[in-house]
Image (cartoon, helix red, strand yellow):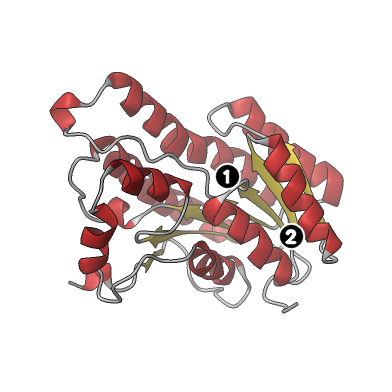
Amino acid sequence: MSDLLNGKVVLVTGASSGIGASAARVFSREGATVVLAARREGRLASLVEELTQKGAQASYVVCDVTVAEDAARAVAFTVDTYGRLDAAFNNAGLGGDRTPLHLMGDDVYDAVMDTNVRGVWNCLRHEIAAMLTNASGGAIVNNSSVGGLVAIPAAAPYIAAKHAVVGLTRAAADEYAQQGIRVNAVAPGTTRSEITADWFGRNPGLEEMVNSMTPQGRTAEPEEIANAAAWLLSDRSPFLTGTVLPVDGGFLNQ
């Protein structure tokens, strides 16, 4: 166990799989007490059991981030259980379909925007309110994407949503800097997860094509994104706020 997040109480959304589950493992290994939030209770319970067996402090709350009351309840549970909320990783997200814009259905647009934008909005409001009661403020990391900084074909709602996450990050960072709350974002490149596995499964050759566009020539492991988020949430990045950190194997350098 390290001490990057030692003593901090951290809420992780979308924690039942992928980057969120890896974040729960990384944050707890770095000394944090973690509260895991997601919709799939069975997976959350299993992950909490795994972490507590390793000596970590961990608990979970079932939460759909698209529902404001659920986001409020997740934050309230954290504060009621551990006395405060020091940090949060707003990771819950939805990829949607890879379909040309003119063929994209309203249902896909609504689902992607609801999860990726409204979900972050709901969480930010309640996390910030809780952190304003801390003498030392707090730190938040939102999970955007390289798609929040550039365009990717046949994914218009996803691109729009992840750009919006960048906007929310910068707006909140500016608004609450004086109160000691830092708000940053990670912008992962292609990362191994259920979302990308689904995309790759439905689009043969897509992973090879994306990897060929990445200087490091590979797909990221979710732990690599979680490590970057842990650093941004830690006291070792005290003068960083409003930053969008690409974790993309050099994709945006081209």
Eyeballing the image, is 253 above or below 206? below
Question: Picture coordinates of residue 174 (x, y %)?
Answer: 44, 55
Residue that label 2 marks: 135
Q: Position of residue 35 (x, y in %)?
A: 73, 50
- For residue 223, what is the image quadrant? bottom right
In the drawing, what numbered circle is on residue 185? none
Mark 1 Cα shell of 10 Å, populated few (<14), some (14-19), many (≥20): many
Q: Tell me the tag on residue 14.
A: 1
- SS at circle 1: loop
N-terminal-most mark, 2 or 1: 1
* On screen, residue 66 above or below 123: above
Total numbered labels placed on residues in the image: 2
Res 245 quadrant in image: bottom left
Q: Amino acid at mark 1?
A: Gly
Residue type highlighted by circle 2: Ala
- For the N terminus, the image quarter is bottom right
- Residue at the far left in the pictured view: 102
Query: Which of labels 2 and 1 is toward the front?
Result: 1
Q: Is residue 166 left or right of residue 30?
A: left
Q: Is residue 142 visible?
A: yes
Task: State whether residue 86 is above or below residue 29.
Answer: above
Residue at figure coordinates x 21%, y 60% from the top left: 209
Q: Nearer the viewer, residue 46 or 66?
A: 46
- Image quadrant where one finds the C terminus: bottom left
Residue depicted at 83% across the width and 58% down the height = 52
Whether tag 2 and tag 1 are in contact, CB under 8 A, the answer is no
- Estimate the spatial distance between the alpha carbons at disc 2 and disc 1, rounded to whole Å: 28 Å
Q: Secondary structure at mark 2?
A: loop
Query: In this rendering, does residue 138 appear at all?
Result: no
